[in-house]
Image (cartoon, rainbow, N blue to C red):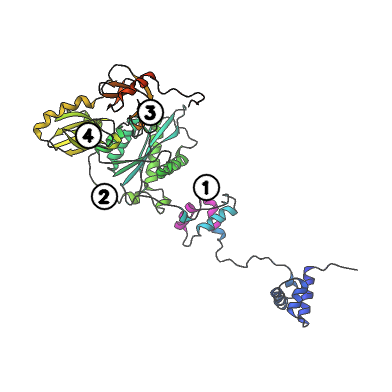
């Protein structure tokens, strides 16, 4: 009759065969194990007897790196009282309480073991992160507008915020009902008056900050403040919020610790609580990105320089000083203007725009919408200032000459074809319809009653009949698709 042997009995038979003189290799082959396993059975049987042949746990008898129960209980208590704290924040707190705190991975495993956080499938390595920050305080500020601050009556307020790139010190925090250009500029002037003037300010492309992407480009009040105080205004690429990542991280912290799930009785009450939170954030709250110290520890290292903040709005209210000779000029495609046969560089971003040129004290000051964009040494004689007016009328958009007109569509290269000859209009008008007139020996290109370009006629006069016969352009062939 067959009977099934237990694991202990099989191991005992193997040990007995080995003790009776059988080869260890043969015994291991018969019982289907490694020869080293048979040696371990022999040692355990010799030291502890038959009971030592039973299965044992693979857990080590001691682990010198295991977190003590008291420390694990403290980790659980910190996480329970502050659900937003992660392993890194808890580690910074334990460093102040313990002489030998556990490592960050140990705290993470403890929180996972207690089911206080979910395990991450994949974690990025520290070398995968690319850190970018300025080397000293007051070198760069980041500014932005945050919404989502609610009052009890349902009104949504906006928060105008600013942060120093190097120290993470919050330099601007003001609540407004509408984040238009005026309150944004007032918040900027208040921040400059309180903390000083930085070298650069980084913002997105919002209309309250800049008008460089407008059609046509315009100079906003924010740009004028930066220009008046010698601040370089930097812009992010469109749809690139990661460039202003530090101010976005400030918004996340501000929402989480102050605004989420709350409604305030009035904007004044919300501003009082925001001011108190900013004071705690700047002077007491540890910031992990700067070594677990408060932002004031870095920001206080800046050299204190007493400077006067210039407000272009207040300066404009003062009686204007006597001005020199002022004329207007239109900027060409190369970004230059012409003054008495001398050419001066203004900037290609102003191509096609009209600028004002003032001649005073041996200098030529070029202004666009009241903002000085370039200053050059005067190349003509001072006695020739009276001759500057000879091109004032040419600098202003002239009205097109009345007469017979044909319509043409501007191609992708910014040109139109008339009588088999291309005439330049401009890349900005590609795909649009313009009018073409022949006036004496010139060709005028117009749009909506505005004169865009005037060219010397270069086409064959004999081909004009065909051009006038097709006032709306070349007729389409039969079956040709209409785009």
| Start-end of magenta stretch | 71-98
Q: Secondary structure at mark 3?
A: loop
Q: Secondary structure at mark 4?
A: strand
Does the rendering let one see residue 323? no
Quote the CA–CA distance across marks 4 and 1.
Answer: 68 Å
Does the rendering let one see residue 130? yes
Q: Is residue 290 above or below residue 390?
A: below
- Residue farthest to the top, as pictured: 403
> Magenta stretch: dominant SS?
helix
Q: Which residue is mark 4?
A: 337
Bin the neighbour count of mark 4 within 10 Å (Cα to Cα): few under 14, some 14-19, many 20 and up: many
Q: Is residue 74 magenta?
A: yes
Q: Are marks 4 and 1 in contact (CB under 8 Å)?
A: no
Q: Position of residue 112 (x, y in %)?
A: 58, 53
Task: Give 460 or 168, whichever is nearer the viewer.
Answer: 460
Considering only order in the chain, which callout, 2 or 1, is on the residue closer to the N terminus? 1
Task: Give 339 or 402, whichever is nearer the viewer.
Answer: 402
Q: Which residue is mark 2?
A: 303
Quote the CA–CA distance across marks 1 and 2.
Answer: 40 Å
Q: Is residue 479 left or right of residue 237?
A: right
Q: Position of residue 453 (x, y in %)?
A: 29, 27
Residue drawn where x is 23% and y is 46% of the image: 305
Q: Which residue is mark 1?
A: 81
Q: Nearer the viewer, mark 3 or mark 1?
A: 3
């Amino acid at each position: 009759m067959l009977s099934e042997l237990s694991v202990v009995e099989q191991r005992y038979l193997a040990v007995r065969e080995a003790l009776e003189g059988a080869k260890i290799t043969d015994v291991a082959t018969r019982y289907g194990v490694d020869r080293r396993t048979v040696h371990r059975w022999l040692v355990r049987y010799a030291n502890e007897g038959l009971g030592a042949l039973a299965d044992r746990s693979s857990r080590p008898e001691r682990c010198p790196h295991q977190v003590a129960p008291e420390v694990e209980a403290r980790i659980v208590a910190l996480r329970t009282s502050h659900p937003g704290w992660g392993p890194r924040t808890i580690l910074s707190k334990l460093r102040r309480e313990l002489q030998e705190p556990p490592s960050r991975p140990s705290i993470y495993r403890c929180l996972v073991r207690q089911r206080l956080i979910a395990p991450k499938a994949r974690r990025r390595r520290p070398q995968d992160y690319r850190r970018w920050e300025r080397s000293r305080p007051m070198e760069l500020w980041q500014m932005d507008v945050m919404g989502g601050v609610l009052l009890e009556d349902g009104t949504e307020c906006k928060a105008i915020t600013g942060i120093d790139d190097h120290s993470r010190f919050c330099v601007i925090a003001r609540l407004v009902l509408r984040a238009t250009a005026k309150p944004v500029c007032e918040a900027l002037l208040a921040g400059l008056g309180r903390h000083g003037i930085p070298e650069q300010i980084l913002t997105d492309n919002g209309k309250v900050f800049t008008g460089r992407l407008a059609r046509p480009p315009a100079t906003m009040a924010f740009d004028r403040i930066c220009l008046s105080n010698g601040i370089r205004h930097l812009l992010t690429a469109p749809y690139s919020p990661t460039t202003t990542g530090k101010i976005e991280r400030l918004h996340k912290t501000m929402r989480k610790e102050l605004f989420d799930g709350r409604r305030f009785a009035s904007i004044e009450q919300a501003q009082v609580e925001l001011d108190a939170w900013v004071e705690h954030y700047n002077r007491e709250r540890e910031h992990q990105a700067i070594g677990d110290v408060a932002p004031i520890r870095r920001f206080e290292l800046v050299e204190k320089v007493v400077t006067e903040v210039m407000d272009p709005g207040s300066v404009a209210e003062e009686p204007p000083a006597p001005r020199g000779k002022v004329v207007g000029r239109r900027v060409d495609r190369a970004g230059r203007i012409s003054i008495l046969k001398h050419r001066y560089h203004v900037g290609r971003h102003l191509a096609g725009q009209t600028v004002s040129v003032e001649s005073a004290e041996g200098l030529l000051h070029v202004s666009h919408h009241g903002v000085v964009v370039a200053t050059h040494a005067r190349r003509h004689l001072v006695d020739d200032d009276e001759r500057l007016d000879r091109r004032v009328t040419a600098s202003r958009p002239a009205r097109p000459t009345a007469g017979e007109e044909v319509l043409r569509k501007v191609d992708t290269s910014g040109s139109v074809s008339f009588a088999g000859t291309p005439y330049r209009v401009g890349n900005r008008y590609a795909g649009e319809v313009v009018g073409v007139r022949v006036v004496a020996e010139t060709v005028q290109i117009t749009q909506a009653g505005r004169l865009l370009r005037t060219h010397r006629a270069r086409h064959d006069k004999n081909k004009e009949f065909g051009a006038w016969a097709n006032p709306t352009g070349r007729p389409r062939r039969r079956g040709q698709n209409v785009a």
